[in-house]
Amino acid sequence: MVSARPAWDLLPRDAVSVVAASGGPDSTALLVAAAPRRRVIAAHFNHALRGGEADADAQFVEDLAARLSVPFVKEKANPPAGPDENTARQARYDFLASVARTHGCPVVAVAHTADDQAETFLMRLIRGSGTLGLGAMAPSRRLADGVTLVRPFLKVTSAQVLAYLERKRVPYRTDSSNFDTTRLRARIRAELLPELRTYNPRIVEVLCRTAEHLRADEQVLRPTTEEATSL
């Protein structure tokens, strides 16, 4: 069930964690909320795709980290990480894994929310994914040797994030590419999810719960499937 409570147990108490901070509302809320609770490093990756807007994002995160007394690490892609979303995402994860290894951090935290989970589920459904793909994003997964990627906000909605930032009077940056509806995720966010909410206002919760059930099914069925295929 979607809940307003982040999964802070995913961040270790006895070690420093890397928090991926883009400057957007979700990662800003994660950094602001995690800083008083755990020892963290803010890590920002500039894909070098949005010119001065992206440079301003990096400066925003650096300033926020300074106000929170949190160490800050950044990197700018050179050459640019490329327009392909998968390539850009992998470049960012490679950077985060490198920061974690350099600083001896066992965990990298990213701020994917319940809304992101619902969008991922719909993207994979549209593309014809099976059970494994429809399980969408797991709360934690291996990122690199000795480094785990965690998602403490996976049961927190975007609306709850925005309400938190407003309550705390914390500003954030807006990525203009999020409004480019030639990208499937942006189109789902702008068009499909709002339409589905007219059928069920709790559609995000429904899709997240379905993804969770399918992940559980996959974990149970995978050993049986592997055994059968090895015969």
Image (tube, rainbow, N blue to C red):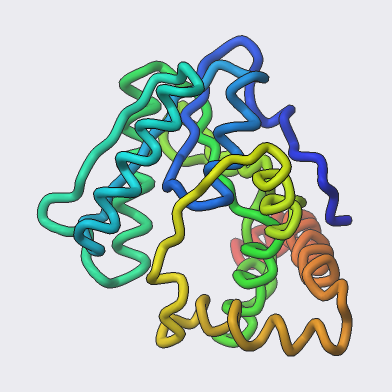
The picture places residue 61, in percent across and down from the top left corner, at 39, 38
The picture places residue 85, in percent across and down from the top left corner, at 36, 68
Image position of 154 with respect to 11: above or below: below
The picture places residue 154, in percent across and down from the top left corner, at 70, 51
The picture places residue 42, in percent across and down from the top left corner, at 43, 30
Rendered-image quadrant of the N terminus = bottom right
Which of 38 and 120 lies nearest the eye of the viewer?
38
Relative placement, left or right, of 139 versus 201 is: left
Number of labels in the image equals: 0
Query: Residue at the spot x=52%, y=24% of the render?
Result: 17
Query: Residue at the spot x=54%, y=37% of the render?
Result: 109
Relative placement, left or right, of 215 versus 200 is: left
Query: Residue at the spot x=53%, y=42% of the render?
Result: 28
Image position of 40 with respect to 194: above or below: above
Query: Residue at the spot x=39%, y=69% of the render?
Result: 176
Relative placement, left or right, of 20 versus 85 is: right
Work out which residue is located at the far left of the displayed protein and give it. 79
Which of 40 and 91 lies nearest the eye of the viewer?
40
Work out which residue is located at the far top of the displayed protein and give it. 14
Rendered-image quadrant of the C terminus = bottom right
Relative placement, left or right, of 48 versus 116 is: left
Image position of 132 with respect to 168: above or below: below
